[in-house]
Image (cartoon, rainbow, N blue to C red):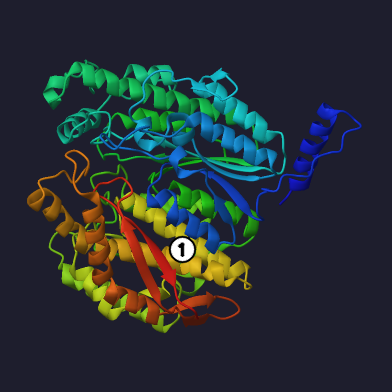
Amino acid sequence: MRRQARKILAGVLAITLLSGCGALAPAPPADVPPPEMIACIPLDDRPDNVERPEYLAASLGYTLVFPDMELFRTRLDGQGTPASGDRAALYEWLLKQEAQGCDRYLISLDQLLSGGLVSSRALSGETPVTLSDGRTLSEGALLRELIETLTADEENRVYLTDSVMRLAPTVGYGGYTLEDYNAIRAYGMAPRPEAGELTAEAVLALEGLGADGSPLDPAAFGTDGQKTAAYLACRARKLTLACEAETLLGDLDGRFRLLLGIDDSSAEDCVQKNEIALLRAGLREADVLLSGVDDLEFKALTRLYLDEKASSLGMAAAVRYFGGTEDLPACDYDFQPLKTVVREHFDYFGLKLAEGEDADFDCLILTQPSEGTDPDAVVTDLIAALTANAKAKRPTVLIDAGNGRYAPMLQQRLTREVSLGGLLAYAGFLDMAIVTGTALSHGVARFARLSCDAARSPEAENAFIKTLADSLIVDFCFKNDVRPRLLTRVRGELGGSADNFCVPQLDIDALTAWVDAEMLDASAALRKNIAGSKMLTAVAPRVRTRKVGAVGIANCRYPWQRAFEITLDISCGKH
């Protein structure tokens, strides 16, 4: 790895000097980082932040390395302690990677400074970090020290991610209920005055006020003053830290990139409005602020690959919408029209918008159906486009931003009529702003890899298959088939909570065995489809394909002991 030898030698010399000039220098550490390693502090321990980024990185020839998962795990109420990540241990792990020669970093500031995404919505005020050597640092001081340390090596490439706090806290964490979530989200959605001055102080001074400048009454939204005060304090801490990160990066060059994501939002003139404007104003040329948070690692990994391996590769894509509502937000949790979200992601990846033969690949995007539109006809048109592209061997990214309006008919027809393993990328799970970033990250990454590196290892190709299969299987089979039955089972038959299987305590082993069996059965037809598809293996000087081969799943489980998401192990057969 670049500069690795220099860093190890520096450590050896330092030890030699400390132990006396006549002493025999110790051997370099045995656990030096593997080639093409990226040290990652993830947002949290959900699959979109661990397993799936690991697949994407491997498909690009990188090795994504994490600290022990116990150091960044999130536990909801009743699931044990600690509830959030160990910030001191994570920081010291990063310093260890630097000392051992790592020169690529992907660091979630939500995790490093707050212990994870959920915890970042619950902490208020200064929360110092005490290191193993006894030093106590403020979050800002810790971030400053880390940036100074990583800046010292000019070969380092550091990708920092952070979020604009969403409109409400997390159900089942810190005692918050679904009723609390709904009430506080309504409070956060209320219009605020526009800040005349873009400073943190000016923005925060307006967050408890309505559009007319008078204080908002928490009771009008079904909550109380104590809870809204705590909520505003969390927002203040979160915004202050994000502004501090922008200030610390200051004039640093493109070796450091900051990627900010806007968490669950609203098309209303909500509490995020001034925060977003302030943070946009503080961005450097190398930085960006986009819709979506759970896709931040995907976007950072793809940008890193483009920066390192494909900086001169000009790419252009054609976009076709199906459904007719691309000029509206794709769901209730975004503040921009879908078309704007797509365009901003194109800009981030350096993609040009083109048509026909001028485009390197197509993005086919399903929207919610416009009023009076026949959903069946929309799906038929989409499938016709997918079929034509497959026949022409045209690289294609498929995005389902239909927000469930076509399910399960869409998934059933795609499985029967389209060779899904031939796609560059697919996304349809989670909020619609997130599916855009997820699908484009994977699609751009795959096209760039096909364009830049013909000599890909079998492990890298299998990792690509896993990224695609995971997206399809979790969306088609879990979200649209197994999860509705899981909700009925947990809430109806077992009398439990779908948001937290531990409050009241359910038999999680039995629930895990159930979902494992159900997913194996529900995914059989889709896995057969993927296995029989022909995947793209080259795009220039001509398109080449090969059969995907067998895809298996096992060990389905609930990372946060709730019904919202699962993770699973994917295997790829020999080719």
Query: Is 194 displayed left or right of 183 in the figure?
Result: right
Between 525 and 203, the one nearer to me in the picture: 525
Quadrant of the image occupied by residue 159: top right
Please count the marks in the image: 1
Residue for point 49% across, 79% down:
574
Query: Is 392 displayed left or right of 235 in the figure?
Result: right
In the figure, 457 relative to 3: above or below?
A: below
Quadrant of the image occupied by residue 312: bottom right
Q: Could you tell me residue 177's position as x and y percent? A: 18, 33
Res 363 seen here: no
* Name of the residue lying farthest toward the bottom: 391
In the figure, 527 relative to 267: above or below?
A: below
* Name of the residue lying farthest toward the front: 23
Query: Is 490 displayed left or right of 110 in the figure?
Result: left
Between 502 and 485, the one nearer to me in the picture: 502
Q: Badge 1 is on which residue?
A: 443
- Local SS, label 1: helix
Quadrant of the image occupied by residue 397: bottom left
Between 485 and 60, the one nearer to me in the picture: 485
Residue for point 25% across, 50% down:
564
Res 1 seen here: yes
Between 23 and 414, the one nearer to me in the picture: 23
Q: Could you tell me residue 181's position as x and y percent? A: 20, 33
Q: Residues within 10 Å of mark 1 (few under 14, many from 20)?
A: many
Q: Amino acid at mark 1?
A: Gly
Q: Could you tell me residue 464's position as x and y percent? A: 48, 66
